Image (cartoon, helix red, strand yellow):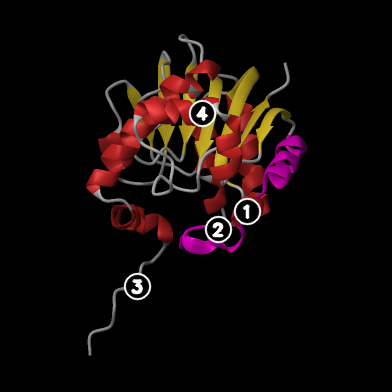
Amino acid sequence: MTRPATPARLDAVLDRLYAARFSPAERRRRAELWRTLCDGFFNRYVQPDATVLDLGAGYCDFINHVRATRRIAIDLNPETPEAAQPGVTVHALPMQALGSVIAPSSVDLAFASNVFEHLRSPDALLEVLRAIFTALRPGGRLIVMQPNVRALGARFWDFFDHTLPLSDRGMTEALTLSGYVVTECRARFLPYTTKSRLPHSALLVRAYLAFRPAQWLLGKQMLVVATRPA
């Protein structure tokens, strides 16, 4: 009898995991959604001459659409280089090793969307936060967007690769322990996934971003902005 193939490590099958999770049509909708999210919200945190680092960039939905002079993506997914637009530099390495390719105090904005929940332990999170802290310029920002376990409960475990449950309070504690100053914290921001009820038309997404009560009703992901002190 033929035995089923056994993945050696999750990192080695990320392309298969995400290809099964998101169809090509869903990936196209995600890209358009992120274009609107960047234009309607995230670009307010970015100066045009900034260096921006996207951690766990995946299909580059954020870094492809943010306006910045230098754009860097880090991810172990072998499909990330193919997804990156011209002008985006991609490095395939673990986040805690970003110091091997990013000079200290050279990044104006680091962005981590739906990535820290994939880490194996609180110690791993602290290691990554310290590496980001070193890469940021004094006064530079880290934006974290990820599932809020206080809002989700058991639904957090709907995805096989979710391993580190965090709430907005726990994320704030980890950032403070790592030397950051938290300047903005929204316990509820976007819905859990792009498969959720967030409308995809640009007009309705902009209306959702502008209407905070809708975020309190539908939001399951936190948004935390932290700064490396000057």
Of discs 2 and 3, which sits in the foreground? Answer: 2
Q: Amino acid at mark 2?
A: Phe
Q: Is the Cβ of the residue at disc 2 closer than 8 Å to that at disc 4?
A: no
Which numbered disc, 2 or 4, marks the residue closer to the eye? 4
Judging depth in this view, the residue of 96 and 212 nearest the camera is 212
Residue bearing mark 4: 209
Give the residue number, with chain letter if any, for mark 1.
149
Residue type at numbered disc 3: Thr
Residue type at numbered disc 1: Val
Tell me if residue 3 comes above or below residue 224 in the rendering: below
Q: In the image, what residue type sits under mark 4?
A: Leu
Asked whether the residues under the numbered discs 3 and 4 touch, taking CB atoms below 8 Å apart as contact, a structural biologist would say: no
Q: Which callout, 3 or 1, points to the residue nearer the camera?
A: 1
For mark 2, what is the residue? Answer: 156
Specify the principal SS of the magenta part: helix
Q: Earlier in the sequence, mark 3 or mark 1?
A: 3
Q: Position of residue 63 (x, y in %)?
A: 40, 28
Q: Where's the N terminus, which quadrant? A: bottom left
Position of residue 75 measured from the top left corner of the image (x, y, whole percent): 41, 41
Q: CA distance from mark 2 to mark 4?
A: 23 Å
- In this view of the protein, which residue sits in the foreground, 208 or 119? 208
Q: CA distance from mark 3 to mark 4?
A: 43 Å
Q: Vertical placement of 13 versus 114: above or below?
A: below
Tell me, yes or no, if residue 4 can be seen here.
Answer: yes
Q: Residue at x 36, y 46 (%)?
A: 77
Is residue 176 toward the left or the right of residue 140 in the image? right
The residue that disc 3 covers is 6
